[in-house]
Image (cartoon, rainbow, N blue to C red):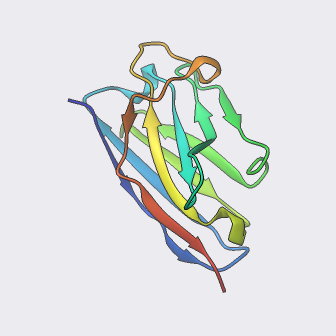
Amino acid sequence: QVQLMQSGGGLVQPGGSLTLSCAASGLSLEHYAAGWVRQTPGNEREGIMCMSSDGSTYADRSVKGRFTISRDNAKNTLYLHMNNLKPEDTAVYYCASDARFGSTCQRITYANWGQGTQVTVSS
C-alpha cells in the first residue's frame, strides 16, 4: 500500500520561506514522477511543481523562480522549498505521485496523494 506522509506548512509572513516534506512508503519515489499540487477554496487543484523519475523538473509559471522541488532518494522523501512567499500562495498543498514506473511530468497522472497541509501567507 502506497502512503505519502506530508509534514511542514503553517503560517508565514509575506516574503518568508517554508519547506514541505513528503515521505513515501510502498514505492520508491526515484522511479516515479511526483509533485506538488495546491488547492484554494472554490478552485480546482493545480499542479505547481513536478519531478520526473529521471530527475527532470517542471515548475508552473506562478511559482517559477520562487519554489524548488527536490528528492532525497535515501530517505524516499520529496520536498517543496518555497521562498518569497506571497499571500496568493495560501492554499492546501498536496504531494502526489504517479503509479507508473518510469513516469514523467509530461504525462503524469496523479494516483497517490498525501493528506494535504495548509500553508497560509499573511502578515
Residue drawn at (70%, 72%) of the image: 87
Judge from the rendering whether residue 33 lies leftward or rightward of residue 22; answer left or right.
right
Residue 56, picture quadrant? top right
Residue drawn at (57%, 24%) of the image: 52
Which image quadrant: the C terminus? Answer: bottom right
Residue 24, picture quadrant? top left
Query: Looking at the image, is 101 positioned above or below residue 6?
Result: above
Query: Looking at the image, is 72 positioned above or below residue 100?
Result: below
Residue 81, picture quadrant? bottom right
Query: Looking at the image, is 66 positioned above or below residue 18?
Result: above
**Residue farthest bottom in this picture:** 123
Image x and y of residue 121, in percent: 63, 74
Judge from the rendering whether residue 102 lies leftward or rightward of residue 50; answer left or right.
left
**Residue farthest left in this picture:** 1
Image x and y of residue 12, in percent: 59, 77
Image x and y of residue 7, in percent: 38, 58
Determine if residue 43 is in view.
yes
Residue drawn at (53%, 67%) of the image: 119
Which image quadrant: the N terminus? Answer: top left
Image x and y of residue 111, in percent: 40, 28
Determine if residue 74 is in view.
no
Front residue of this view, candidates 85 and 71 = 85
Query: Looking at the image, is 3 positioned above or below residue 10?
Result: above
